[in-house]
Amino acid sequence: MAAQQSRRDGAVIDKIQGRGFDAWIGSLRRDTDDYAYGGLRLVGPGVGEADARILLGDLLWGESLLKNLMITHALQQGALDRFAHTTPGGFRHSRVGSARCIVRIRDEATFTLLRNPSHPRFEATLTPILASIGDYLNGQRGRITLTPDFGPYASTADLLHRSTPHVLGIRQELGGCGAKAAYAAVGLVASFDRLHVPPETPIAVIGAAGAMGTRLLSHLVYQGYRDLTVCDIAYQDGRGRTDVPANTRRVPAQPGRFPAECLDRGGVVVATTWGRELVNSDLAAIRPGTYLLLAHNLSVPRGATGTAMLRTLAANHVVVLPGQLLTLAGALAARLEWYGRRCRPGEPFDSEFARELSRVLAAYWTDLVLSRSRRDGTTPYETLLSLTDFTDP
């Protein structure tokens, strides 16, 4: 399995091919970085190579790089200094680059199978694909680490771990953080709490049946919020939780966009979705004074398009918090795992400690971005880019 290498905007991109799949692995790693890190996503046979490379770039730059820059910034500013004696060696002064992997499944039936982790052939079908990815990572000698994070498949990191040590998100008894979504959900809840939303405020949760949406919804119910609207395609499929208050309004999901019936509620709208929905939604439906929390990857289009959209919303007094901030805690847990497995081999991962750091980091960035954006008259997203010195190629 030979890799075809190319470069674009400073990133190294390798393409590998195996039986039934193609994979593109990109990395941005400076000499001062200990390693490059990011997620792995599956796409179906209908995605052409050009589109796969665009998706890779969007995730590599706009997600992995920016999140790692945010964590490094917080460490350099001393936001986590009170935990310095508890974090693993090297973590406090860590610098991490970015990486991403897109795997295209060539056969539609196989792609459909791999979207269902309960399928009896799921593991047998996925294992050889991950083994090929593992061989590639072994050849990189630790310069790149990945987390399979496509869908609700916490076990996939352990499957990749069978063929390589250069994977994060493995089970906790082996020193791994486990499913990153659990920590991302903790960060989302912490960010929401920093808004000090009154209990009578209307709140809509789009993607309410997913891992993060479920955690947030439980928190809202526990905290006494009653004016709730939920939306998720799982409800239409007869799946999803049913233990929400009886008076909770359910809105039909619209794949690829946010339903106007959720956007026009006012108050707070939280989206824990797949990505790219904002650009396809009716922004005029969002009421002035709304907080829009985009708690997912690919939440804002890169470059001038995304900036213009958020400025339009800001002019209508809509405050948008981007996904890089709201889902940051997953990347934090992965970084803790990397240093912990090297400094404390064989020790179980301390998930409670990681959750506490997640809360602190989310609160730090939420407070900082909101205060600076109000002071400077910029959008929170632009403030975030400025604080991290992020440059989009």
Image (tube, rainbow, N blue to C red):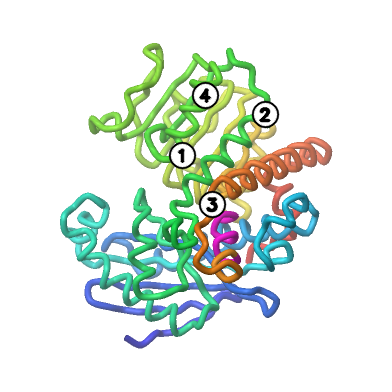
Q: Name which residue type carries label 1.
A: Met
Which quarter of the image is occupied by the N terminus? Answer: bottom left
What is the number of the mark on residue 348?
A: none
Residue that label 1 marks? 212
Query: At 41% across and 73% down in the image, what residue appears?
Result: 24
Q: Is tag 2's residue or tag 1's residue first in the polypeptide sequence?
A: 2
Quarter of image, res 165: bottom left
**Gap in angstroms between the C-alphas marked 2 and 1:** 18 Å
| Residue 75 x, y percent position in the rendering | 74, 57
Helix, strand or loop under label 1: helix
Helix, strand or loop under label 2: loop
The span shown in magenta is: 331-339
Task: Kindly report which numbered mark, 2 or 4, lies closer to the viewer in this rendering.
Answer: 4
| Residue 198 x, y percent position in the rendering | 64, 17
**Gap in angstroms between the C-alphas marked 3 and 1:** 11 Å
Q: Nearer the viewer, residue 114 or 337?
A: 337
What is the number of the mark on residue 330?
A: 3
